[in-house]
Image: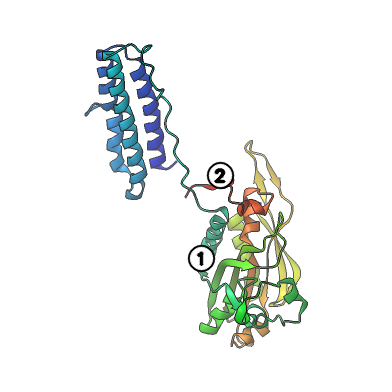
Amino acid sequence: MRKDAALIDELEALEGEALRAIEAARDEGDLEGVRVTFLGRKEGRISLLLRRLGELPNELRPEAGQEANRVKGVVQGALEQRRGELEGPSREAAPVEDLSLPGRRNWIGGRHPITRVVDEICAIFRTLGFTRVRGPEAETEWYNFVALNTPLDHPAADEQDTLYLKGGHLLRSHTSPVQIRIMETHEPPIRIVVPGMVYRRDTYDATHAPAFAQIEGLAVDEGITFVDFKATLAEFSRRFWGPGTQVRFRPSFFPFTEPSAEVDVKRIHTFPDGTTRESDWLEIMGAGMVDPAVLENAGYDPERFTGFAFGMGPGRIAMLKYGIPDIRHFYDGDVRFHRQFAGP
């Protein structure tokens, strides 16, 4: 538990204890004893906690300090009110409001679960030597299809049909166009991950959305082989899902990679009682060696350079990671759902 959270919990506990002691005071002597116990300058319990604020890092002090001042003010106010009751009419003649319950703090939000997964994935690839980059969401047909070895009359283009804009532009259907843009402006070696939003004419259902996050990755250099491709993605999978994760590569087809593969993982679930169970095979990404035609379109010599590319949907990954059955929960804006993921 963070130091500021522990301090806030202690303050709230002291607040409730102090309010109960104030309510139980029967005369001025009892009330003065309560004041010294909780607010005494040297040994008061709340005063001692206030001195611990200086032990917190600078970024954690504001919230803890605000809560400490609130608790001190509530206790001081309760003391004054109780002192007036003891000096004036009886409690039966002047009923008072019950202040024994602590105030309810508003939820101030947290990072979206998909954002958390994107950051975690990019952090793992950063340790493997990859740089996080981004590019425009409004693209041309050249970058979105043709440069990626997908002619406009190819069936693969129909599968990723997207939303078209004026002036010959469209909303990108994947983040792969950034790979072409990076290769056009940089010489190898290249190792990048590209998170961002993409757009397709998908039906909005439990596993699809017309606008969703995607992460592409690319590595290009002299001498990159299929062994490098498999080892990198297997290492990522084990770091993300756990050291006991099994990884499987199944043959597949993508226009911009050859050979291509679907990457599956089988995870080990550990339950609170210590028992474990293997999951079924779960598909987490598509990948493959970069097609020579794509390297040529970017201005690279495919006889000299090779590489691999991969793509995954962090929304699907988040569903698997957190056990979410319906992807629409991520986009509906229900605070009760997102409150589960509040935190750093």
Q: Position of residue 234 (x, y in %)?
A: 64, 63
Pick the residue in front: 309 or 100: 100
Q: Position of residue 27 (x, y in %)?
A: 28, 12
Disc on the earlier residue, 2 or 1: 1
Q: Position of residue 14 (x, y in %)?
A: 37, 28
Q: Residues within 10 Å of mark 2 (few under 14, many from 20)?
A: few
Q: What separation in Å lies between label 2 and label 1 (alpha carbons)? A: 27 Å
Q: Which mark is residue 194?
A: none
Q: Residue at x 38, y 23 (%)?
A: 17
Quadrant of residue 257 within the rendered picture: bottom right
Pick the residue in front: 340 or 91: 91
Name of the residue lying farthest toward the left: 42
Horizontally, residue 94 falls left or right of residue 249, namely left
Instruction: Say which amino acid is labelled 1.
Output: Arg
Name of the residue lying farthest toward the right: 155
Q: Which mark is residue 126?
A: 1
Instruction: Say which amino acid is labelled 2.
Output: Gln
Which residue corresponds to mark 2?
A: 340
* Vertical arrangement, residue 218 with respect to residue 120, above or below: below
Q: Residue at x 61, y 60 (%)?
A: 314
Q: Is residue 242 visible?
A: no
Q: Which secondary structure lies at badge 1? A: helix
Image quarter in which the N terminus is found: top left
Q: Residues within 10 Å of mark 1 (few under 14, many from 20)?
A: some
Q: Position of residue 112 (x, y in %)?
A: 54, 53
Q: Which secondary structure lies at badge 2? A: helix
Q: Is residue 312 visible?
A: yes
